[in-house]
Image: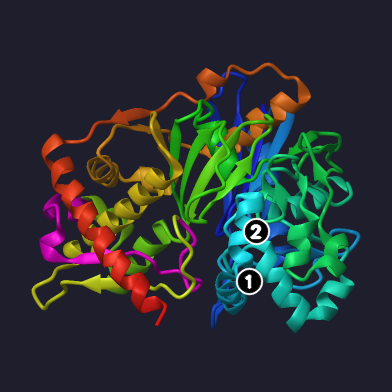
Amino acid sequence: MYVGIDVGTSMVKAAAFDAAGRQLAVESRSVGLSLHGGVVEQDMEEVYGAVVEVLGALTAAVAEPVELAGLTGQGDGVWLVDGEGRPVRPAASWMDGRAHELVDRWLADGTFETVFRRTGSAMFPGCPGPLLAWLDSSEPKALDAAKAALYCKDMVFQRLTGAGPTTDVSDASMPFLDPRTRSYDNRVVELLGLTHRRGLLAPVSDPVATAEALGEGLPSGTRIANGPYDLPACALGAGVTSPGDGLLIVGTCLASLVATTELDLTGEPAGLYISTDRPGHWLRAMPAMVGTAALDWVLSTTGVRHDEVDGLLAETPPGANGVRVLPYFAPSGERAPFVEPRLRAELLGVSLESTRGDLVRATCEGIGYAARHCLEAAGLDGSLAVCGGGTRSPAWMRLLADVLGRPLRVVEGEVGARGAVLAAAERYGVPLEAEAWTRPTEVVEPDPGRAAFHTRGYEEHLGRLAEARTRART
């Protein structure tokens, strides 16, 4: 069997596949997030322990030898480790907002734009540049004690294999990697005041690093490949490799990706260019901060269960009886297709007559409008695949097809883990049939009438968003 490991923000998963790409089994464990005052952190030992646990359960459940394993996981954040890969402090999550004042300052003084013009990366508070600069000024002893500032999957790779600290071109894309040279831009490090911390940046493996498991979770000697991180891994797992084709990941974060061979560093700085394993090929990424997390908040606040969502969406008309939601719920604001650290969610048109269904549908429509904005900014002009936890709701997929006004190639299952295996197979020279591995589960077509309605709704959304962005800056 082939094993894909996906170390997510709130869930750690391991999936087993056969040589034809059929998913044999999945094991998952939830991991905690500590949220307080804009600070979002994770316990590295809990995360690593969950990885070992799901791998042990998976290999016990499927009585076949492991041919190879691919590793992926959440990106951004700062995972400070010592020389053995052990935590120096809790991991600062990509959702962390404590560095927003630094980003505000860099937006004002031009540093933000200069970094984007050099690397194609629009910084946000939870990416490594601002977080490392914040730690350097507020917790310098933590940086002094660290051997490396890693990303999540890199920490797991080091612990599973005993290999030295390393990362890959996909994770390094934010915000220090020059996408043309595929190496760190030391001028960017200097602009962020981090030259004296340059040694914390892990060496970039290009192609991704490989090593053998030491025996924790996976049998000793199992071949493992480290990367790419979850967004490009999902693109591989969904078969999004041709220029112009796109992927929408409806997960905790709402990520829009479009494959491209053109590097355009003009225009409004936003999102990033993710370097792929093929030089000259990138993913234009617009990863919005909040996807299913926004709906989860509304469901918990209103007392609606997840299994009630489809029924409420079916009962409530398009437009949610006048209720509108700007779905920018993250404590660190928004990062795509624009950067606005102080932007917050807004609920409009709510009255005593509004129902739970109105709030749920308005939130789903708002997330859809945000996705449309991101996909347009990323340059989508081909087919669109969709994956993530949101695909489990057929009604939401129909709503998304209507809001986006285009067919959706729905790819279900553990798409990131699938992509991690495909990347590992490429690295090890193992022939796997990518078309079979990435075949969509179904194609959802939009309804022409509802699509026309939502085209008007999208224009109204953009107007409300412009007003909200103005308020966020005052």
- Looking at numbered disc 2 in the image, what kind of residue is underneath it? Val
- Find residue 388 and report its horizontal and vertical position in percent: 45, 45
Callout 2: SS: helix
Q: Residue at x 89, y 50 (%)?
A: 164
| Residue 28: percent from left, percent from top | 57, 49
For label 1, the residue is 41
Of residue 409 and residue 372, the one placed in the foreground of this image is 372
How many C-alpha atoms fall within 10 Å of the one at disc 1: few (<14), some, or many (≥20)? many
Q: Give the side of residue 131 with respect to residue 144, left or right.
A: left
Report which quarter residue 459 is drawn in.
bottom left
Instruction: Assess disc 2: are there few (<14), some (14-19) or many (≥20) residues with their C-alpha within 10 Å of its C-alpha.
Output: many
Q: Nearer the viewer, residue 187 or 46?
A: 187
Tell me which residue sits at (67%, 49%) in the image.
173
- Up the image or down, 358 lies above or below 365; here it is below
Question: What amino acid is labelled 1 in the image?
Answer: Glu
Which residue lies at the image location 77% right of the left edge and 62% below the top edge?
A: 189
Residue designated by label 2 = 115
Residue 260 sits inside the magenta stretch:
no
Between disc 1 and disc 2, the foreground one is 2
Where are the magenta residues, as a range? Answer: 311-336
